[in-house]
Amino acid sequence: MGLFLLDVAAGPIIIIALIILLIIIGIIIGLIYLAILLIRKIKRDEDEKFLNKEKDDL
């Protein structure tokens, strides 16, 4: 009986903890994705500047 009460009480807590964990993992993945996009954009801007310099030299 004691174990049954523990399971009933722990069930919603475990579900809430899993939801919070999934949210945290999602935020981390989102931040990594944004960082990758930002790095790509910076690289692209630098490449364009370099190409524009070469055109000006010609």
Image (spheres, rainbow, N blue to C red):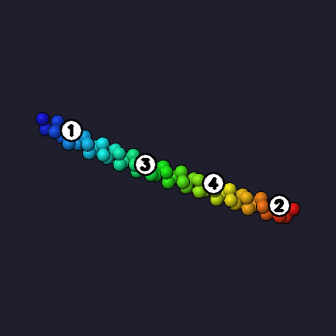
Secondary structure of residue under mark 3: helix
Mark 1 and mark 4 in contact? Answer it, CB < 8 Å: no
Q: Amino acid at mark 1?
A: Asp
Pointer 2 with pointer 3, Cβ within 8 A:
no
SS at badge 2: helix
- Tell me the distance, in whole angstroms, between the alpha carbons under discs 1 and 3: 26 Å
Query: Quick check: marks 4 and 2 in contact, CB under 8 Å?
Result: no
Location of mark 3 (residue): 25
The numbered dot on residue 7 is 1
Residue of label 4: 40
Question: What residue is shown at x 57% (from left), y 53% (from top)?
Answer: 36
Tag nearer the camera, 2 or 3: 2
Image quarter where the N terminus lies is: top left
In the displayed structure, does residue 8 sit left or right of residue 24?
left
The local secondary structure at tag 1 comes to: helix
Q: Secondary structure beneath disc 4?
A: helix
Q: Residue at x 13, y 38 (%)?
A: 2
